[in-house]
Image: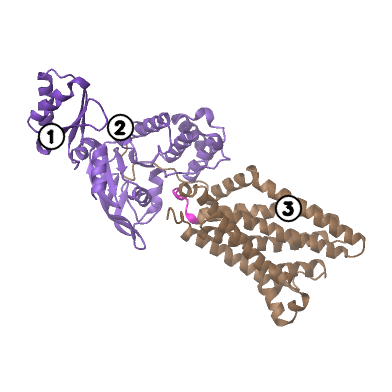
Chain colours: A purple, B brown
Amino acid sequence: MTPAVEVNGVGKQYGSLVALDGLTFSVSAGEVIGVLGPNGAGKTTAIRVLTTILPPSRGSLSVAGVPHTRPAEIRRLVGVLPESSGYPERQTGDEYLRYFARLFGQSRPSARSLAEALLTQVGLSERRHSLIASYSRGMRQRLGIARALVNDPQVVFLDEPTLGLDPAGQRQVLALVRRITAERGATVLLSTHLLAEVEEVCSRVLILNRGRLAAEGTVSEIARRAAAPRSARIRVAAEHVDRARATLTASAGIEHVEPADGQLGSLIAMLNGQTSAIAMNNGLRALADADVPVLAFELEGARLSDAFLAMTEEA
Amino acid sequence: MASAAATTRALPQRRTPGWVIVAEQELRDLWLGGRGLLLSFAFSVLLSIITYLTATNQALNFLEQRESVNVTLQVAIAVGSLLTLLAAADAVSGERERSTLESLLLTPVPRLGLTAGKLLASLSLWLAAFVITIPYVWFLGRGVSLVGVALVSGIVVGTLLAVFLASLGMIISVFASSNRVSLSVSLFLLLAVFAPSQLPSSAQKGWAGELLLRANPLTAGEHYVGKIVVNGHAWSEDASWLISPLAAAVLFSVAAVIVGARFMRLGRSGT
């Protein structure tokens, strides 16, 4: 099967500034892939190159099987929510969608019914005749996603769709992203700063740093590759701290244990990188044998956020 | 499940050309959004004042009837075409500033179509200005068989100048880093184009003076209208004065469409 997105050695340069450098990856159809990276990593540039807004300086790419040398064809097959997209304040949501539906080739009647269906899908049907000026930020983002779907795209690019939204707004947008893949079977490239979003909805992750691909894989694969030293945070009752510390220190695979700064009853156990999982199991078992009740336990260095920080800081 | 192959989804074929859809929407935004109405109202207030002054001068025999029609018509042409310049100067830089340009560029409508649609919509301001001018010209020119001639010369010259200035505004808007820059540069250039008409009459004489008047589309167009309306010349008698307005309209409109198609971009931040 042709990949939905295929990128081979793509670079983008503005004068002496290298925005993208030798980007190579592919995305299968129907996949939700997260594009992560710190500010200036090249996420937005990568999306603009993939959506034909910017031509690549070198390399080749294809979207939905269409090479980048045929940009007009690609634009017919992709839906895009650009970063910080603006909206015409004096149009209603309905007018806005009908306009874009017509630009994508729909007749007036079909543009009308399409706008109605999309507004219902994104939960804006009751506000379809209100001016966009009166929409909240979350409503505008959902309207933007509806606009990205007017051409029934095969690949949807969402650049920071939850930027500036409150938690409820973020949940609504993420629910929409899931529906796009579940109901339409579209491939989604989700660029974001929020790692929790990626862990929640993405099957795979690309981490960009300084225009280069720093890591690629599933969330768990990338988390496993984290370069940060592994440690565990354990919380016990304050009266058991000394006993817990002694028990853990004596446990195999735990290199040393120290109290967590300013947190009564919390200990940080530094684990041997090679056998960290076994070491922690041993430690917990030893605590149980020593009758030390564990109130909370968290393995650090095994999360996507740790991997992200390790990979982007390292580079 | 969607297949990634490009051929699997039946995409609708556009029945209406993209530039028509863009022009329709721009017209709706301009007129239903209120900006066009506001500019037209300001235009009609200005024209009322000019007409009142010329009618008063005419009544006091300071101005002949033909001259009063000419003054009003020339103001209408100048200000009407200025309105198109203002609308066109906002066309691309305004979209860029409101962060709405990227969504437009992501549609399959070619950039040439986007430019043409926006250009046509901005010209509607000149047409509205001309319609507003008709009763004023009729009021001043009634009784001397002047109204028809004045209006025909006005629409011809005014349309040529409006196309020229709207195209100039569009070109500036495509390259301007902000809307403010676009409007400032457009107004500055308009003043530069108008400047020769304010030269003392002695400076407008001789071959150099005439060349300056003929080469400048605005002064040449207004000179042609004056010859028809004030001096009662035949249409063809001074047709050579229409060369520069016609050439400017054709060249600048072609340039605007080409520049728009080639250089319409997100700008420095979005490169």
Q: Identify residue type, mark 2.
A: Glu
Quarter holding the N terminus of chain A is top left
Residue sitting at x 78%, y 68% = B226
Secondary structure character of the magenta stretch overall: loop
Task: Specify which label sits upstream in the sequence, 1 or 2.
Answer: 2
| Residue at the limit of the structure toward the bottom, as seen here | B207
Q: What element carries label 1?
A: strand
| Residue at the limit of the structure toward the top, as seen here | A291
**Tag 1, which chain?**
A
Q: Distance between the residues labelled 3 and 1?
A: 82 Å
Q: Where is residue A284 in the image (x, y as percent from the top left)?
A: 13, 24
- The answer to if B109 sits in the magenta stretch is yes
Residue on which disc 1 sits: A256
Name the mark on residue B43: 3
Q: How far apart are marks 1 and 2 (CA)?
A: 34 Å
Q: Identify residue type, mark 1.
A: His
Residue on which disc 2 sits: A200
Observer-nearest of B126 and A249 = A249
- Tally of numbered discs: 3
Range drawn in magenta: B105-111
- The answer to if B64 sits in the magenta stretch is no
Q: How far apart are marks 3 and 2 (CA)?
A: 57 Å
